């Protein structure tokens, strides 16, 4: 099975170079407000992973619809690589046109890296359509979007895993997140390493599974925060209910 990296990342653009960041927070984006803003923060440019303003991926137009089954055949987005189609079909053993978390874990893990079920559940949450009648299952279009996204994230991980250890340490993680548009402060980096390094203390490091999980959470929570910070000031006022509603979906078993 070929790895993710061969197939780009689904039209979201090429792998971004690390943007300059003079302060911690979110690096600048073309859609950020004018420079007269009083804040020194800007938002991530959204180059890595699910689209910054459109995740989960928007439903296709009627002229590009991908039905789940027509005469027993699945229909994938145009341009889907045959290996990606085969990966989906191989785990859709009942031919239902959708796969559950265990089948998704098998499909992604067979490509390159063994993903934990916790990471798989997070990815299922992030890439499924909000109005899905089966939030615990994923169809072909969402699977292709996820697969291509992971290819881009794999490329970033490998770029900053300079010693080819299969893990990235704190400084490498900082650079990797910065390349995705997120200048994360040292205190948050410490928390990420402590929580996603499989319990290894002191000079911990993250493998690809942990990198995907913590990176997707940073990105997802930032996007949710942006919805509240309408002035792009780097701060927002949240109600207690709003805070819980924003954070709890990212806390997966």
Image: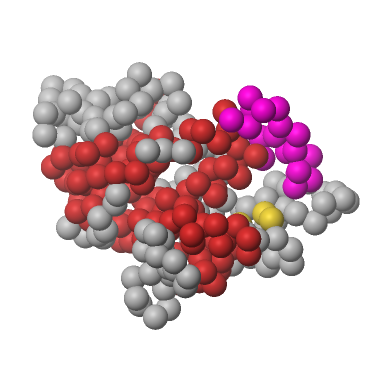
Residue 96 is covered by the magenta coloring: no
- Residues 58 and 109: in front is 109
- Residue at image point 60% right, 37% down: 224
Q: Residue 85 appears in which quarter of the rendering?
A: top left
At which x and y percent is residue 193? 49, 61
- Residues 124 and 197: in front is 197
Q: Residue 141 appears in which quarter of the rendering?
A: top left
Answer whether residue 212 is visible to the viewer in this image.
Answer: yes
- Residue at image point 48% right, 38% down: 250
Q: Seen in the image, is 48 located left or right of residue 60?
A: right
Looking at the image, residue 52 lies above or below residue 17: above
Q: Which residues are magenta?
A: 226-244
At which x and y percent is residue 188? 60, 57
- Residues 233 and 52: in front is 233
Looking at the image, residue 1 lies above or below residue 174: above
Q: Where is the C terminus found, in terms of image quarters?
A: top left
Residue 230 is covered by the magenta coloring: yes
Q: Where is the N terminus found, in terms of image quarters?
A: bottom left
């Amino acid at each position: 099975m070929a790895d993710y990296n061969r197939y780009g990342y689904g039209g979201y653009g090429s792998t971004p170079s690390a943007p300059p960041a003079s302060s911690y927070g979110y690096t600048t984006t073309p859609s950020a407000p004018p420079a007269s803003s009083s804040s020194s923060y800007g938002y991530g440019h959204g180059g890595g992973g699910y689209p910054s303003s459109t995740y989960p991926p928007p439903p296709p137009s009627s002229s590009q619809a991908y039905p789940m089954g027509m005469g027993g055949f699945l229909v994938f987005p145009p341009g889907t690589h045959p290996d990606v189609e085969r990966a989906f079909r191989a785990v859709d053993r009942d031919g239902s046109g959708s796969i559950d978390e265990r089948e998704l874990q098998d499909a992604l893990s067979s490509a390159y890296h063994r993903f934990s079920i916790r990471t798989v559940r997070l990815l299922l949450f992030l890439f499924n359509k909000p109005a899905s009648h089966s939030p615990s299952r994923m169809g072909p279009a969402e699977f292709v979007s996820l697969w291509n996204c992971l290819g881009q994230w794999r490329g970033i991980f490998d770029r900053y895993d300079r010693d080819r250890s299969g893990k990235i340490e704190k400084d490498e993680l900082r650079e990797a997140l910065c390349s995705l548009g997120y200048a994360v402060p040292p205190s948050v980096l410490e928390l990420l390493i402590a929580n996603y390094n499989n319990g290894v203390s002191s000079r911990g490091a993250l493998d690809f599974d942990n990198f995907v999980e913590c990176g997707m959470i940073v990105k997802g929570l930032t996007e949710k925060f942006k919805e509240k910070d309408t002035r792009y000031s780097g701060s927002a006022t949240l109600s207690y209910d709003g805070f819980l509603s924003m954070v709890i979906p990212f806390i997966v078993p």
